[in-house]
């Protein structure tokens, strides 16, 4: 399989991986937001997703962009803004 070498495709992949992390870890994410332990609670899942993303994207594109981190914030944090939490 060829590595992804366009920013648009890399961004789509990052968001798809973040969506999967969100879908399969909903309860952990909700608990993490409520207790302000989100990134500790799903650290392993985030890193597993990052490794998958890194393995599919051309190294130079991976090194000069932060699509995966932005997708994690958009999909896991921003999208859960309706959950009551002391952090917002």
Image (spheres, rainbow, N blue to C red):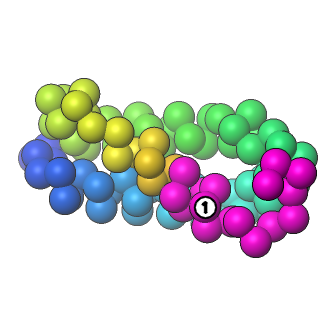
The C terminus is located in which quarter? bottom right
Q: What secondary structure is marked by label 1?
A: helix
Image coordinates for residue 84, horizontal then vertical, percent? 87, 64
Q: Is residue 42 among what the camera can see?
A: yes
Residue plotted at (40% across, 45% down):
68
- Res. 55 visible in picture: no
Residue 87, magenta (yes or no): yes
Question: Mark 1 = which residue?
Answer: 78
Say if the magenta span includes residue 62.
no
Give the residue displayed 89% in from the left and 51% down from the top.
86
Which residue lies at the image location 24% right of the left edge and 51% below the top edge? 10
Q: Which segment did they paint magenta?
A: 73-88
The quarter of the picture where residue 24 lies is: bottom right
Mark 1 closeness class: few <14, some 14–19, many ≥20 residues within 10 Å:
few
Q: Position of residue 42 (x, y in %)?
A: 69, 42
In front of the other: 3 or 38: 38
Quadrant in the picture for residue 27: bottom right
Image spot of residue 40 (x, y percent)? 74, 34
Residue that extends furthest to the bottom in the rendered view of this protein: 82
Q: Position of residue 19 (x, y in %)?
A: 51, 63
Using residue 82 as the reference point, say whether residue 8 is left or right of it. left
> Which residue is painted at 80% across and 59% down in the image?
30
The answer to whether residue 20 is left or right of residue 82 is left
State the count of labels: 1
- Left or right placement of residue 22 versus residue 39 in this view: left
Kindly give the residue lying farthest to the front in the view shown: 88
Figure check: 63 above or below 48: above
Observer-nearest of 24 and 34 = 34
């Amino acid at each position: 399989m060829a590595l992804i070498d366009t920013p648009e495709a890399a961004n789509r992949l990052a968001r798809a991986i973040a969506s999967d992390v969100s879908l399969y870890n909903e309860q952990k994410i909700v608990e993490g937001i409520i207790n302000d332990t989100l990134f500790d609670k799903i650290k392993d899942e985030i890193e597993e997703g990052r490794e998958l993303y890194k393995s599919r994207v051309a190294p130079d594109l991976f090194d000069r962009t932060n699509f995966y981190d932005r997708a994690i914030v958009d999909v896991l944090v921003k999208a859960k803004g309706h959950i009551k939490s002391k952090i917002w």
